[in-house]
Image: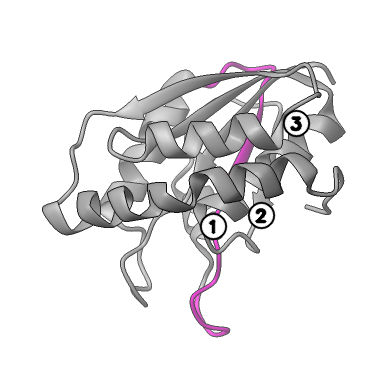
Amino acid sequence: MSGRLVAVFGYSAGRNEELHAVCAARVALAASEARPGDAVLLSGWRRSRHSASEAELMASAWNGAAERILLDDSARSTFGNALAAAAAARRLGATEVVLVTSGWHGRRASSLLRASLRGSGSTVTLAATSERGAARVRLRELACWLLVPLLGTLAARAPRTRRL
């Protein structure tokens, strides 16, 4: 398959068993962005072994078009989400990756995804929700930017395959 991969990065705020409202907004935006021939990657980890992963919760809420739905429940961070999306894009031969995340998270997430895709020929398009996030979340996001140069370098050097 060549074409588009719509990658939805998960979000949760703890050990909640339900889809977080931030993540639900991302899934809704992804459903509006996805086209019938697209592959969709839902990426987010399992907080405990007895709960559903963010990826599984997003899949339960999915109501968009897609040729294929992929789940990655191993990504525990934005960096892990980016690596999973890049591996899926390479495996599928995607020429475009539509990254779906929150507005406050989009710049950092797209920077890490672009670094992970370096040399693949895939482009990244950002589709971000309009929510700004709580002050605590925005402050954490700002602190995480300090790691972007290091993580971007690691992402560009990461192995190019990953099982989903």
Q: Residue 56 vs residue 14: left or right?
A: right
Q: Position of residue 128 (x, y in %)?
A: 35, 28
Give SS at disc 2.
strand
Marks 3 & 2, CB-CB < 8 Å contact: no
The kind of secondary structure the magenta stretch mainly shows is: loop
Q: Position of residue 93 (x, y in %)?
A: 84, 23
Q: Nearer the viewer, residue 57 or 77?
A: 77
Task: From the image, tell me which residue sits under label 1.
Answer: 44
In the picture, the quarter occupied by the N terminus is top right
Q: Residue 162 vs residue 137: left or right?
A: right
Mark 2 surroundings within 10 Å by alpha-carbon count, few (fewer than 14), some (14 through 19), many (20 or more):
many
Q: Position of residue 7 (x, y in %)?
A: 57, 35
Point out the tag, 1 or 2, that comes first from the N-terminus.
1
Point out the tag, 1 or 3, that comes first from the N-terminus.
1
How far is disc 1 from disc 3 in space, using C-alphas?
17 Å
Q: Quadrant of residue 49?
A: bottom right
How far is disc 3 from disc 2 in space, using C-alphas?
13 Å
For residue 89, the mark is 3
Tag 1: amino acid: Gly
Magenta-colored span: 34-51
Q: Is residue 101 visible?
A: no
Residue under the image location 48 percent in, 50 percent down: 58
Task: From the image, tell me which residue sits under label 2.
Answer: 72
Q: Is residue 68 visible?
A: yes
Disc tally is 3
Tag 2: amino acid: Asp
Q: Nearer the viewer, residue 50 or 153?
A: 153
Q: Position of residue 53 (x, y in %)?
A: 53, 66
> Relative to 2, is 73 above or below?
below
Residue under the image location 54 percent in, 57 percent down: 44
Give SS at disc 1.
loop
